[in-house]
Image (cartoon, rainbow, N blue to C red):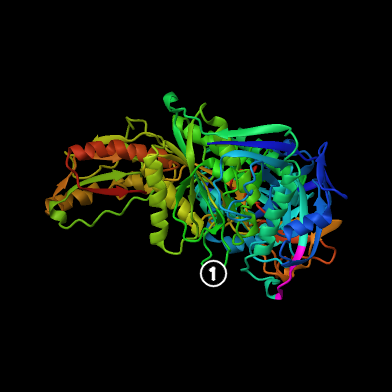
Amino acid sequence: MKLEIGNFYVKDIIFGLKTGYKNGILTVNKKEAIDALNPEGKLTNVDLHVARPGEKVRILPIKAVVEARARLDGRVTFPGFTGATAACGEGVLYALKNMSVMAVGKYGGRPEGMVDMSGPAAELTHYADIINLAFTAENVDPTENRGDITKTNLNYRIGAHLLAEYLGKTVLTQEPEAWERYELSDVSEKKLPRVVLITQHATSSRNPGEYNDMFYGVDARYLVPTLIHPNEMLDGCMCSSSVMPACSHNCTYSYQNYPMIKKLYSGHGKDIDFVGVIINCSFEETVEKKERAAIRVATIAKMLGCDAAIFSQLAGGHCDVELFTTIIKLEEAGSKTVGMCSENPGRDGATQSKTMLDARADAIVSTGSNAQAIELPPMDTVIGDLNSIGRDRYPGAWEYDYILGPSLRPDGSLIVDRRIILDNDGAPGWSNKTCKDF
Amino acid sequence: MKKIIMYLNQFFGQIGGEEKADYQPTIHEEMIGPALAMAPLIKDGRITHTIICGDDYMNLHPEEALEKIGEYLDGLEFDLLIAGPAFLAGRYGVNCGRVCKYVQERFNVPAITCMNEENPGVDIYRKDIYILKGGDNAARMRNDMPAMARFANKLLNGEPILWADEEGYIKRGIRQTVILDKEQTAANRAYDMMLKKLRGEPFESELQIKMEERVAIAAPIKDASKARVAFISTGGIVPADNPDRIPSASSTRFGRYDISGMDRLEPGEWISVHGGYGKTHANANPNVIAPFDALKTLVKEGKIGYLHPYFYSTTGNHTNQREAARMAGEILEFLREDGIDTVILGST
C-alpha cells in the first residue's frame, strides 16, 4: 500500500477573479469558493479571510481545520464524508502545504477554539505557524446558532472539508514541487523492534447526530479499537469531531499530518519496524468498557508481535484512566510503551495533573499544561466574534472571575486558560512544550 | 540598592550553643556569621540587618517569636529575607521555613532559605517558599551560600524563576508549561524515549510518578511468651571505647554487641555517642535508651519467649533514609539466622 503526496508550498493567499496556484501564490475566487463550501445553502453570511503568521490577528471560534487536498483518480478526498465511500491510504494525493482551511462561526462553546497569529498564544499552537484561509459563517437554521456546549457544527465541518477539496483540485493539472511517499515496506528480515502507534479519538458523544470523529464518514461512536494502516490516517479516513475542548481538539488537519506517524515512518527500516496504527476510543462510560478497550489494544499489539508502543492521548479525565489502563495492559503484553499526553494540574499548577497515576507508566512525554492561565494582548483584527468570549460557554474563558475579573477586557485583551487555544495539547506529536516541576 | 534581612539561629548568630537555644529574637544592624559570607555574593543589594533567635525559643514559642520579628521588621524597608542555611539541623530548618513563610505573607516580600532535602522543614514548608537544596552539614556552607546568593540575585533583579531542577530549589508541587526549542516536538521526544526504553538505556519520564514506599505495619504478636525478640537502637549507645567508631551523626555504620552474659547495661561500660540530645541521663544509665534491664527481667519472668543475644546500635541523628534502609537490611540477615520474629526499635 503506497501513498504518494505531491506538495505545493503556498507562500501567500490572495483573492482574485480566478482560483489558481502559481509561483507559491494561491489566488481564490471568493464567490466560487463560498459556493463550493456551502452547496446546500445551509450557511449564511459566509465570507473568507486570510491570516498569516506574525500578523496581529485573532481567530475565534474555530470549529474545524483541514489541509487542502485532492486526488488525481477522482475519488473524493474524504471518502464517506465528502462523497462516496472508498479505500484510503493508496494512490496519489496533491496537497497545498503551509496553509489550512478553517471554519469559523459566530458562537463558541465546548469544541470551539482560538488561534492568535502573533503574541504569547502563537507559541502554543502549530496553527499559528501556517497561513490560515478562514471562512466565517452562521447557520441558516437559527437553532444551530448557539453558544452552548453540544452542537454538531456539521455544516461548518463539511464546509471546511469541501473548501479544502475545492482548493486542492486547482493544482491537479500542475507538477508538484516535492513528494512525500509512505509505504510500510517489508523489513522483517532486519529483525527490528516492532512498534505500533495507538491514537485516541473523540467517540464519546452518545447524542444522536454526528458529533464524534467520522471514520470513513461514519460517526465513530461505539468504536472498538481497530487496527488501521498509517496511510489511511494520513489520507482522510478520519474527519474530526465537534466534541473535545479546543486544547485537545485533534482537527482533520492533525490527522492528515499526524506528526507521530511521520516520525515512526522516518525510522521504519532503520531503527524500527512500524507495524500500524490502532485507533482507540475515548470517554468510555463504564470501567468494563475501558478495560475491554485496553484488552483489545494490548491483544492486537501482541498478535502483531509488538516490542514497543506509543500511545497518543486525547484530552484528560476519562482519557487518563484509558491511557494508564492501556499502558499497563500493553506492558503486560510485552510492549515497552511511551505515553504522550497533556497535563491538567489546575490553574495554579498545584493539583495532581492526571486523574489516574500508575508508576508502571514509566515513560511519559508531557505536552504541557492546558490549565494555566495566560494574558493576551489585544489584536488589530479579529476573524469571527471576540464577543463570544464571556458570552459563550468555552472551557477556558469566563464572563467574570472573582480573582481574575472578566476574560474579555474592554480594550480587547484577554485572560484565559490555555484550554481555549486550539490544539494547545498537540498530543499527536506537534507540541514543543512540556511540564516541569516548579 | 536592594535591602536584605538575614535570619540565623543562636549558634550561627554567635550567641552560643545548645545552652543558648532559648535565646529570644534580637535584631542587629550589622552582619553576623553567614551574613558576612553572603554579603560579597550579592550583586545589587546589601544586608542591612541580622535577626537571631534560639532554636528552642522559636520552636516552643513560635507565635511570640514571629510576632517579635514582625515588630522588628515593621519599620524597615527590605526586599528579601534570607534564612539559614540550615543543613540537616531539624529545629533550625523548621524555624527557617516558619520565619520565611511568616515574613513572606505578612510583608509580601520574598523569603528564601536553604536546607538539606531530608530536613523536616522541607516537607512542612516546600509548598510555601523557595527552599534551595543544601548540604547536610555546615562544611557545605561553601556550596550553599553561592547557591542562595545566585537565587537571591535573580529575585532581586526580577528575573523569571525557572523550574526547580534548573534553579536548585526543592519542588513546590507546582507543574507548569515550559516551551522548548521548535525541533523538540513531542513526536521526536517520544520516539527517542521509546528507543532508549527498547534498548535498556536510561531515560527520564517527563511525568515522574512515584508511588510512596510504605511499609505495612506488622500484625500484633499473638503470644509474647513465645516471641523471639531482638532490640535495635538508633540512640547511639555503644561500648565505652566505641570500638566500631559509630559517629555522632550521619551514621553509615552500626555496631553488633554481645549482651548475652549481662543483666543490664552497666554505666561506665556503655556510653552514648549520639550528637542530637543531652547525654547526661543516658550516660548515667544507658538502659534508659536501650532497656536491657527490663528486657532481661521479662525473659526471666517468661513474659518474653527469647531475647536475641546481640544488641544492634547506631545513631539516627541526620542519618539519611537510604543508609538507614541499607543498614536495616544488613541487620535483618543476622536476625533471620536466629529466627527472630519480633523487633523492638528504640530511638532516643
Q: Which one is in front, B214 or A124?
A: A124
* Residue A59 vertical position relative to residue B205 in the rendered view, above or below: below
User: Could you say where residue A283 lies in the image, as x and y percent from the top left?
Assistant: 50, 60
What count of labels does the image hold? Answer: 1
Q: Residue at x 74, y 35 (%)?
A: B40
Q: Which residues are magenta?
A: A137-142
| SS for dot 1 | loop
Q: Residue at x 59, y 43 (%)?
A: A234
**Chain of the residue under label 1:** A
Residue lying furthest top in this view?
A190
User: Which residue is labeled 1 in the image?
Assistant: A208
Tell me which amino acid carries mark 1.
Answer: Pro
Q: Which one is in front, B196 or A237?
A: A237
Magenta span contains residue A138: yes
User: Could you say where residue A356 lies in the image, as x and y percent from the top left?
Assistant: 47, 55
Magenta span contains residue B207: no
Q: Quadrant of residue B164?
A: top right
